[in-house]
Image (cartoon, grey):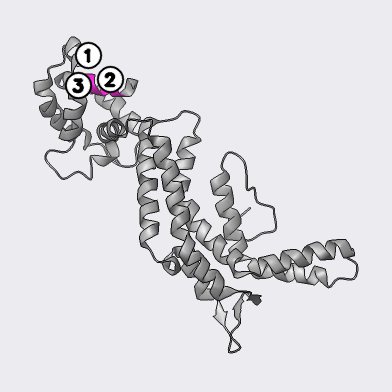
Amino acid sequence: MSSKGGTCRLHVCGTCFVAHKMAALERMMDRFGAYISHLIAMTEDSSVKPADKEKMEVYVKKWQDSKVLLGCAFFHDFLKSLATLCKVLQEDELCTVRATEAVFKTKKALDKLTTVQFEELPSVKKVLARVQEEESGSYIYQGIELKGHDGALTYLKTHYTVWIEAVEKCLRERMRSQDTELLTHVMTLLATNGWERSESPSFGYAALDAVCVRFQVPLEIASVDLSLVQEEWDDKVGYGKQYPNLVRKNYKVIWWKLFNAVDAKGWTNVLAIIELLFCL
């Protein structure tokens, strides 16, 4: 079944519920006119039971409200910003680095949504471009008249940031019990996909220093020479950058190669720190 069109029912629940809901919202926007036309035809079909006709008339009235169509467009954009985080959290084995990266990416995506005008959100903009205003003042989308379009647009423009901020608040509360500063340092040091993009000669130093201070006692007990850590880090990152497609490769694969590299003996101190971070 293709991701667009078709008559097969789409899942909207289950383990990949965000992806399912996005697909359903996209289907609704893409085939809105066909769905409403079908319901209208059913309400006029004499073979349909009166009780069923009443239900369909309620559906038609409800779905012709412009809030439904514009709401589908908004929540498609909204859920897209959460999709990566949800996918990572649903993996069989939770990866701290990927989860932390996903949290920060989600926060960044949500912040970006609040800075964009409602009409400029991608899916909303696409839908609005297809809405035709008639001389009579009515609004038509895929041959269906939308009810209360101006009011719906005003309502959503007023409330969409409130919904985004509510989700951000939930994220902050869920993360409150976590040491987000330490997680950030762990992500900086373990996420090898950031090495290729790093231009600063002191990349990773702040995270290294913070981790060394935080775990100074166990590191000293393990005979780690903290004075050599930065030098070994620079050498190791330079060595790691030689691997092709560094950004797309799994960071665990890269670290396995580094731990087993011929030059690994020269990075014993920094690798001891990395081994500690993998144990957190």
The residue indicated by pointer 3 is 264
Q: What separation in Å lies between label 2 and label 1 (alpha carbons)?
A: 9 Å
Q: Residue furthest bottom?
A: 135
Image mark for residue 218:
1
Residue 257 occupies quadrant: top left
- Indicate the amino acid at tag 1: Pro
Query: From where the camera sits, is residue 44 visible?
Result: yes
Q: Quadrant of residue 7?
A: bottom right
Say which residue label 2 marks. Answer: 276
Dot 3, crowdedness within 10 Å: few (<14), some or many (≥20)?
Answer: some
Residue 61 lies left or right of residue 26; in this view the side is: right
Residue 191 belongs to magenta span: no
**Mark on residue 16?**
none
Residue 170 image offset from top left, x and y in percent: 45, 42
x%, y% of residue 165? 42, 51
135 is higher (above) or lower (below) than 125: below
The answer to which image quadrant residue 145 occupies is bottom right
Q: What is the CA distance from the residue labelled 2 to the residue labelled 3? A: 16 Å
Nearer the N terminus, badge 2 or badge 1? 1
Q: What element carries label 3?
A: helix
245 with respect to 141 (left or right): left
Disc 2 residue type (three-letter): Leu
**Residue 80, position in %: x, y?**
47, 52
Q: Verify CB contact (< 8 Å) between mark 2 and mark 1.
A: yes
> Which residue range is magenta in the image?
272-277
Residue at screen point 87% across, 61% down: 51
